[in-house]
Structures are given as C-alpha cells and as structure tokens.
Amino acid sequence: MITGCAMNGCPMRALGLLHELLLTGTEPDPITVLGILSACGQLHNVNEGKKIHAYVLQHPKLCKETSIENALISFYGKCGELDDALRTFMGMPRRDLISWNAMLTIYADNEQWEKLAELLDQMSNEGIQPDSVTILSVLQACTFLGIRKVREVHGYSLRTGTLSKLTVGNAILDAYAKCGKIESAFRIFKSLTGKNVITGNTMISGYLKHGFQMMQRTFNDMSDRDLTSWNLMLQVYAQHDFNDRAICLFREFQAKGMRPDAMSILSILPACARLASVYLVKQCHGYKIRASFNDLQLEGALLDTYSKCGSVNDAHRLFQTSSQKDLVMFTAMISCYAMHGMAGEALRIFSHMLELNIKPDHVILTTLLSACSHAGLVDEGWKLFKSINETFGIRPTMEHYACMVDLLARRGRLREAYEFIMDMPCKPNASVWGSLLGACKTHGEVEVGKLAADNLFNIEGGNIGNFVVMSNIYAAGRRWDDVERMRKLMKAKDLNKPAGCSWIEVDNKRHVFVAADLSHPNRFSIYDMLVTLDQQIKELNESRIDHLSSV
C-alpha cells in the first residue's frame, strides 16, 4: 500500500501510512523502505529520509540490500544533498550498474560536469559497461566534455546496439547539435528509424542555434508535426530575418487546423516588428484576446511591437487595459515613449512606476537616459544618472555612461562630454566614443571628433562607419587632405559601405527603399520629397543653433 501510494504520486499518503504501520509495532521490510525513500525524494523531505537511512544502518539485513542503497543515493540526489549521496555511494560494499547510473544522473541533473567526468573515468577503470541510462547521463554533459566524448559515446552506442533506442538516438543528435556539429546531427537524424516529434524538434532546435541550411528539409521530412515543431520553425525564420516566410508559415499552420499558443505569437512578433506591419500586430493582438491568453510576457511583447511599428496610441491603449502592470510592461511603455521622442511621457510613467514601489533595473534606466538625451533634457538626465547609484543602489553600466555622453554631446557640450569620458571609472567602449563622434559630426567639431575617432579606430578598426563619419567631419571643415587620408585608410583596410535599406507600410502594402535605387515606380516624386525634407531639416538645425547662440 505504501509503495503503491509513492509510485502513484501520493507521497504524503505514503508517509501517513508509514506512521500508522509503526504504531502497530510492525517493522518496515525492504519493499516498504524503498517506497518511503521514493516518497521522501518526491517531497524533498530530508529529515524523514535521513530517519529511514538511520533505520537502515541499524538493521544489517537492510544494509546488504543494494536496491535500498541505490534508493538512498537517488533520494539524496533529489533533495540536492550531493555530499550525502556520494558518501552513501562510496560506502556501498557492492555497487551495480544502477548505483553508478544513479550517481551519474545526480551529477548531470546538478550540472556537476567535472565530477561526472571523474566518476565516468572511475567507472571505466573498474570495467563497468555502460547502458542506455549511462549514455543519457553522459550526453547531458556534452558541451563540457566536448565533441570527442560525444563521438566516443556515439561509437559505443553503435557497437552495443543502444543507438536503436530512440531516446538514445535523440540524445546523441541533440549532443552533436549543441556542440555545433549540425552536419553530424543531420546524419544521425536521417539514420534514425521511427522518428518521433522530439526527434524533429531536436533537429530544428539545433538549426535555431547554429544555422539552418537544411532546416526546411528536416521540417518537411517530419511525418508528424506538433505545435512545438511549428513554433520552432517560426523562431528560426523570425530570428534570421526571413520575415515573409515566417508570416506565411504562421498562416499555413493555422490553415492546417493548428491553434497558435502564446509561444506562437511571441515567435511571430519579431517578424511583424521588422516588417513594421501594424495590421499584422493587430491580428496577433486580436487572436490573443479571443484565445484568452493571460500572459504578461506576451502583453509586453505586443506593446513593444506596436511601438516598433510606430503605433504609440495602440501601445498606450494596451498598457492602460493591462490587468497587471509589472516591470516588463512599464519598461515596454517607457521604451515606446522614448523611441518616439516623448521624454516627458516616459518620465511621467516612470514616476507612476516608482509610486507603485516597483524598483527599476538598469534597462529601464538606460531607456530613460536615452529619452532625456533625444529630448535635450540635460538637467533631468543628470538628476537621473546620479540617482542610479545614490537612490536605486545600482552601479552605472557602460550603457548609462554612453547615454550621458550622448546627452551632453547632442546639446553641443562636446568638451564637457569628452572630460566626462576621461573621468569614467571604467575604460570606455565603442558605444561611448561613437556617441561623441556622431555629435561632433552634427556640430562640426573637428578636434574633439579626431580624439573620439582615434579611440574608435583602436577599438574597432574594421568598422567602416567610423571612418565615414570622420571623413564627413573633415569634409565639412574643408580639410580635404584629411578626407583623402581617410579614404586611403579605408581602401587599405578593404572597407566597403553596404547599401542602406528601409521600408514603410501604407494601406497594408510594404514599400522597400534601397540607397541609390531607381527601380521604384514613384522614384521621381520620392526623391523630390527627400530633397525638400533635407532642406527643411537643415533650416531647422540652423534655427536651433541660432537660438542656442543667443541664450
């Protein structure tokens, strides 16, 4: 009865029956002890389990039962008591394969890869032959043990016939994929008989991390696809910028009668954002409402995607109607306002967040500093920067310093920004110097720009953008010899500037623009409008500079 309760997910009932048994004066037999140890492991009840261990030690007959010693090892492992598990293992007079597997499994589950490797060597030295359980434990450590060990396990599985077990085949496939050996993983995939959904999903997961030249073929070869298979393919397409394919796949699996879950929507939203399609985001949002997905992560992702598509009003409505506003939702809303130059609204939302006693993290503080920078709110930015450590107890990150440099530099306070960089407690990175260089181009500051560029050339000498910006600064200052020097440097480094690309959606139709492209049917009116906008921007900048000079 006790064993039955333990084996069928009723561990508390099993312990209750043990106490009733003890009240009758009956001593537990080996079968009862095994059941109770299983129950204690399920409940992570270390105290009760140790009492059973003490009882076993008091009865020499029970101590001779290898199955009980193995159960004790598993119990300690489930409770996270690795030292006790090892002591029990080392104190066993006789160890069978189950004993070794139990200890290997504990190390694998707790990611104790070095200890697992040592135990594996010890097992080999004692001549113990691994079985499929051993192999599964070892393969969990594949990224630590390396591809050589994976190949050894693969070879052993072939020689012993254990590769015919689908669980072993799937694990070897997964190990090759995690080690970045996608072609080897694919060969295993093709050789396995009786592939199941897990096999296909494991193969697609490998492509998701290390490449996807054959992923479509793998997906097409799957006779049975579950929702996880489709979601993984959506992630592969979306993460590698195959946005149109992602959208088509999303529609295809719905046409086949599959119902998207929250993960499906999360997988497709990055593609919607890159396509800047508010129409598609609204479809996803509507589906979420109809399906009653109560998922804060999904709400935050929808809000963020509305923002990236330029629909601030839709983002705000979603934020207002959200039943539970956490740090993720506040971060998404503040990022939305910051992205669209609405620094005042971002600061207002931040104040509301603090009133709710939600502590900010470094991400939201970076976003706010960026908002202050784009809006030219120097005083507010300084106040916020000082509060990072003084009020919130967070050490300023490199992103925070870069935002402050950008804030000062955008307002033309370039020397002050340079001095701020020189006073930083950490070595500035390319982002910090890049902010200063970009502002020097805007304000026509050659000398500070040269200081920033020299540092950037040392940090990322292969970034053509830095050379182009510095060349433009020299050109604006009519320093043609320096312009020519920059061009020679770029040529010597074989640096070529890639063509810029952008797109916009109008009436559910996407228009793509590439630099110097003459293929668009409305190209003449488009270029005329660009000339007009360029002139208006220049006039606006000149009026701002005149205003600052008069202050």
Image: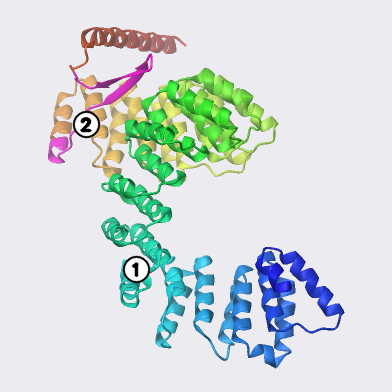
- The residue located at (45%, 74%) in the rendering is 134
Highlighted magenta segment, given as a residue range: 489-517
The residues tagged by marks 1 and 2 sit, at their Cα atoms, a distance apart of 41 Å
Q: Nearer the viewer, residue 372 or 191?
A: 191
* Magenta residue check for 368: no
What percent of the width, then of the height, locates residue 37? 68, 74
Secondary structure category for the residue under label 2 = loop
Q: Nearer the viewer, residue 194 or 136?
A: 194
What percent of the width, then of the height, locates residue 241? 33, 35
Answer yes or no: is residue 208 visible.
Answer: yes
Q: Is residue 192 left or right of residue 229?
A: left
Q: Is residue 264 left or right of residue 389?
A: left
- The residue located at (63%, 82%) in the rendering is 68
Residue that badge 1 annotates? 150
Q: Which mark is residue 431?
A: none
How many other residues sit within 10 Å of disc 1, few (<14), some (14-19) or many (≥20)? many
How many other residues sit within 10 Å of disc 2, few (<14), some (14-19) or many (≥20)? few
What percent of the width, then of the height, locates residue 471? 21, 28
What percent of the width, then of the height, locates residue 530? 28, 11
Point out the tag, 1 or 2, that comes first from the N-terminus.
1
Name the amino acid type tagged 2. Answer: Pro
Q: Is residue 549 left or right of residue 468?
A: right
Q: Which mark is residue 498?
A: 2
Name the amino acid type tagged 1. Answer: Val
Secondary structure category for the residue under label 1 = helix
